[in-house]
Amino acid sequence: QVQLVESGGGLVQPGGSLRLSCAASGFIFSNYAMSWYRQAPGKERELVAAITSTGGSTNHADSEKSRFTISRDNAKNTVYLQMNSLKPEDTAVYYCSARYGFDRYWGRGTQVTVSS
């Protein structure tokens, strides 16, 4: 059974940091490219960052390049998103996603709220 379980979300003040984790099971994690997406209320889901199966290459949305960092640990079947200098506009549900060829899996998301 494929599972992607996000954790690490919560309420943080502007300027703060959070580290999201996504634990994967039920598939060969090291074969899959991994991504983080987010969806704010009333908005479409958007790509935040992506990382190749080996972790050798990453891609971050322009607006987050200097603040967010995606990484993975294939030994732990986990992908991370380090988020620094958080802004109120970063408030959203954050989802991790796994992709390999035509296979695509999604987690249920974790809420991140940036507010004073």
Image: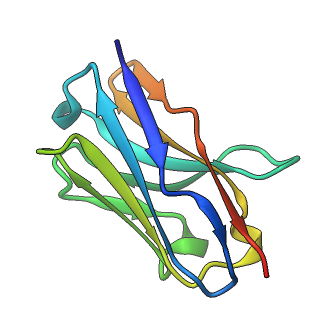
Tell me what residue is drawn at x 38 percent, y 19 percent: 103
Give the colouring mode of the picture. Answer: rainbow
Tell me what residue is drawn at x 27 percent, y 34 percent: 32
In the displayed image of the protein, which residue is found farthest to the top? Answer: 1
Tell me what residue is drawn at x 77 percent, y 52 percent: 40
Position of residue 72 in the picture relative to residue 98 (left or right): left
Between residues 1 and 99, which one lies in front from this camera angle? 1
Position of residue 30 in the picture relative to residue 2 (left or right): left
Between residues 57 and 23, which one lies in front from this camera angle? 23
Total marks in image: 0
In the displayed image of the protein, which residue is found farthest to the right? Answer: 42
Residue 79 versus residue 19 in the image, above or below:
above
In the displayed image of the protein, which residue is found farthest to the left? Answer: 75
Position of residue 64 in the picture relative to residue 22 (left or right): right
Tell me what residue is drawn at x 47 percent, y 49 percent: 7
User: Where's residue 96, x and y in %?
Assistant: 47, 42
Question: In the picture, which quadrant includes the N terminus?
Answer: top left
Position of residue 76 in the picture relative to residue 84 (left or right): left
Quarter of image, res 70: bottom left
User: Where's residue 116, x and y in %?
Assistant: 79, 82
User: Where's residue 102, x and y in %?
Assistant: 39, 18
Residue 103 versus residue 74 in the image, above or below:
above
Between residues 21 and 90, which one lies in front from this camera angle? 21
Between residues 64 and 88, which one lies in front from this camera angle? 88
User: Where's residue 74, x and y in %?
Assistant: 16, 45
